Image (cartoon, rainbow, N blue to C red):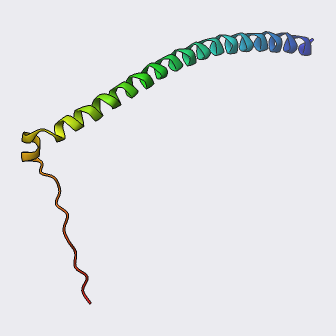
């Protein structure tokens, strides 16, 4: 009699855990799909912003006021001593 009660309770618990796992997996899969869409959107926006930043850097380097405050680095000649 005790074994029958144990198996009934264990069966009900197994079914409940399986249902909980299925619901959990449903939400995890939905979240993964949304995360995938978000990363694709970010990737395309980052690619577009890289071009914009490169163009902005070129324009800044050609600006006289920028060159006044941030002069180009001078290369020093090194002499080899014998």
Q: Which residue lies furthest to the bottom in this view?
A: 82
User: Does residue 46 appear to the left or right of 81 in the view shown?
Assistant: right
Quarter where residue 26 is shown = top right
User: Does residue 51 appear to the left or right of 2 in the view shown?
Assistant: left
Quadrant of the image for the C terminus?
A: bottom left
Above or below — where is 67 with respect to 5? Answer: below
Quadrant of the image for the N terminus?
A: top right
Kindly identify the residue that appears in the image at 48 percent across and 21 percent down.
40
Where residue 15 sits in the image (x, y, percent)?
77, 10
Above or below — where is 72 with respect to 1? Answer: below
Where residue 71 sits in the image (x, y, percent)?
12, 51
Quarter where residue 8 is shown = top right
Q: Residue furthest right?
A: 1
Kindly identify the residue that appears in the image at 15 percent across and 40 percent down.
62
Kindly identify the residue that appears in the image at 76 percent across and 13 percent down.
13
Where residue 27 sits in the image (x, y, percent)?
59, 12
Where residue 39 sits in the image (x, y, percent)?
47, 23
| 54 or 62, nearer to the observer | 62
Above or below — where is 29 with respect to 73? Answer: above
Kindly identify the residue that appears in the image at 23 percent across and 32 percent down.
56
Quarter where residue 58 is shown = top left
User: Does residue 49 appear to the left or right of 3 in the view shown?
Assistant: left
User: Does residue 77 appear to the left or right of 43 in the view shown?
Assistant: left
């Amino acid at each position: 009699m005790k074994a029958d009660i144990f198996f009934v309770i264990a069966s009900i618990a197994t079914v409940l855990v399986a249902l909980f796992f299925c619901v959990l997996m449903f939400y995890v899969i939905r979240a993964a799909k949304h995360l995938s869409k978000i990363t694709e959107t970010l990737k395309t926006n980052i690619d577009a912003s890289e071009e914009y930043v490169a163009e902005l850097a070129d324009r800044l380097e050609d600006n006289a006021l920028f060159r006044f405050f941030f002069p180009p680095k001078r290369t020093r000649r090194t002499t080899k001593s014998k």
